[in-house]
Amino acid sequence: MSSSSSYKLIYFAGRGLAETSRMLFKAAGQDFEDFRYPITIKDGQYIRPEWDADKPKYTYEKIPVLEIDGGKYTIAQSKAIERFLARRFNMFGSNDIEGALIDAAGEQILDIKQAYNKAKTTGGDAVKQFFENDLTKTFNVFEKQASKDKSGYWIGARLSLFDIQLYNLIHFFDDQQSVQKALEGCPALKAIHDKVEQTPEIKKWLSERPDSMF
């Protein structure tokens, strides 16, 4: 498959599990169809009749899904889509070791989100402890790698999948004050966040993307 492939990214009308892939497309300057199923919330329930009708036709009955060349190839699962695009757009490190480090850090982000959701369910001061312990420790580990190359990016000398994943992780939480506190000892991560945000193609996308409830 060549870089002249056509792409259709299918998800809901929200950021959620598709936003990192959208940002990879934008950063690479690659055109794609950004297909969004309508979704609303009523009485705490998601209302999405168009998706409910179409669900059986998708791999694993889940989205996001990436269709390539008019559906000739279909890739399911958000992380698989992100890795595929990052490799294709040369944003997965400059060798297999860098790629594995990017991959592992992305898996840690999944773990941290699961820990956050568990803390919210647990209640009490569990969320406070999450920010002060789990998130702070993870940011500190990420900071060690970010400080090695001094390139302004997390690994190597160019934008990678993880830089975008980190940006979206920082904005994942409602309590931004606690996130910023967790980032206090991490100047390199804060610099990466700002560098991603100021990348011209991403900056344009952030200014024009639809508002989202998730």
Image (cartoon, grey):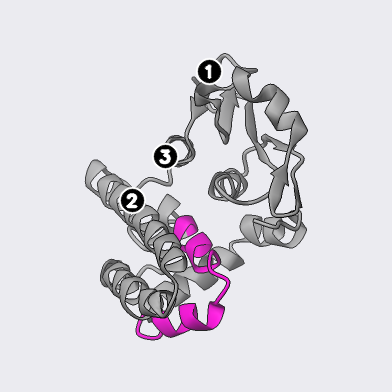
- Label 2: how many residues lie within 10 Å, few (<14), some (14-19) or many (20+)? few
Q: Residue at x 31, y 69 (%)?
A: 138
Q: Residue 57's quadrant in the figure?
A: top right
Side of 52 relative to 140 (left or right): right
> Which residues, given as a range, are shown in magenta?
164-186
Q: Secondary structure at mark 3?
A: helix
Q: Position of residue 206 (x, y in %)?
A: 68, 60
Mark 1: which amino acid?
Tyr
Q: Position of residue 90 (x, y in %)?
A: 43, 42
Kindly indicate whether the residue at mark 3 contacts the one at mark 1 (C-beta within 8 angstroms): no
Q: Which residue is mark 2?
A: 107
Q: Residue at x 59, y 24 (%)?
A: 67
Q: Secondary structure at mark 2?
A: helix
Q: Nearest the camera: 130 or 92?
A: 130
Q: Residue at x 73, y 38 (%)?
A: 48
Q: Which residue is mark 1?
A: 73
Q: Nearer the viewer, mark 2 or mark 3?
A: 2
Q: Quadrant of the C terminus?
A: bottom right
The question of residue 165 being in magenta is answered with yes
Image disc number at residue 83: 3
Q: Nearer the viewer, mark 1 or mark 2?
A: 2
Mark 3: which amino acid?
Arg
Q: Is residue 160 above or below residue 60?
A: below
